[in-house]
Amino acid sequence: MTADDIGEPGLSFGPFKLLPGQRRLLREGCAMQVGSRASDLLVASVGQAGCVVSKAYLLAAAWPGTFVEETSLRVHIAALRKALGEGGAAPEGCFHPTRKDRA
């Protein structure tokens, strides 16, 4: 069963599909490794497509009610850029997540 079979609508952009409820990012149907904070930042950004998104908005989306240095935001944005292949670089490969209940 794939994420598309589950029926979550998702947000599509380019070759990517973001499944916010599952915190999953797919590239052409293949799951990509993205951390939970980076996923929160991506959901906040994609949800505001076409708009300028402030640092304060992104910090509140990924770390609600918590004081966080801007350095943390930069680290997670850099990870997203790497995963998405910004600047023409090929994104890192797909992965197949493992489940703890499988040996």
Image (cartoon, rainbow, N blue to C red):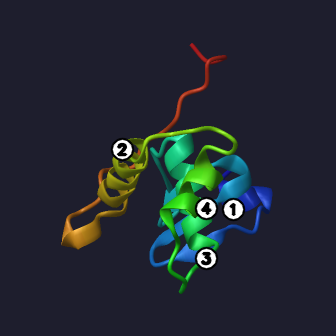
Task: From the image, tell me which residue sits under label 1.
Answer: 4
Q: CA distance from mark 2 to mark 3?
A: 22 Å
Q: CA distance from mark 1 to mark 2?
A: 35 Å
Is residue 24 visible in the rendered image? The answer is no
Q: CA distance from mark 1 to mark 4?
A: 18 Å
Q: Which mark is residue 71?
A: 2
Q: Is residue 95 left or right of residue 98?
A: left
| Front-lying residue, 62 or 32 | 62
> Which amino acid does the dot numbered 1 rest on?
Asp
Task: From the image, tell me which residue sits under label 4.
Answer: 43
**What is the count of numbered marks?**
4
Q: Position of residue 60 (x, y in %)?
A: 63, 53
Q: Which circle's residue, 1 or 4, is located before the other in the chain?
A: 1
Task: From the image, tell me which residue sits under label 3.
Answer: 48
Q: Is residue 101 left or right of residue 75?
A: right
> Which amino acid does the dot numbered 3 rest on?
Gln
Q: CA distance from mark 3 to mark 4?
A: 9 Å
In which quadrant of the rendered image does the C terminus lie? top right
Element under disc 1: helix
Q: Which circle's residue, 4 or 2, is located before the other in the chain?
A: 4
Q: Which circle's residue, 3 or 4, is located before the other in the chain?
A: 4
Element under disc 3: loop
Residue depicted at 61% across the width and 63% down the height = 44
Q: Which circle's residue, 3 or 1, is located before the other in the chain?
A: 1
Foreground tag (2 vs 3): 2
| Quadrant in the rendering for residue 10 | bottom right
Q: Position of residue 23 (x, y in %)?
A: 63, 49
For the view shown, which residue lies furthest in the top direction? Answer: 103
> Which amino acid does the dot numbered 2 rest on?
Thr
Residue depicted at 41% across the width and 42% down the height = 72
Foreground tag (3 vs 1): 3
> Which amino acid does the dot numbered 4 rest on?
Val
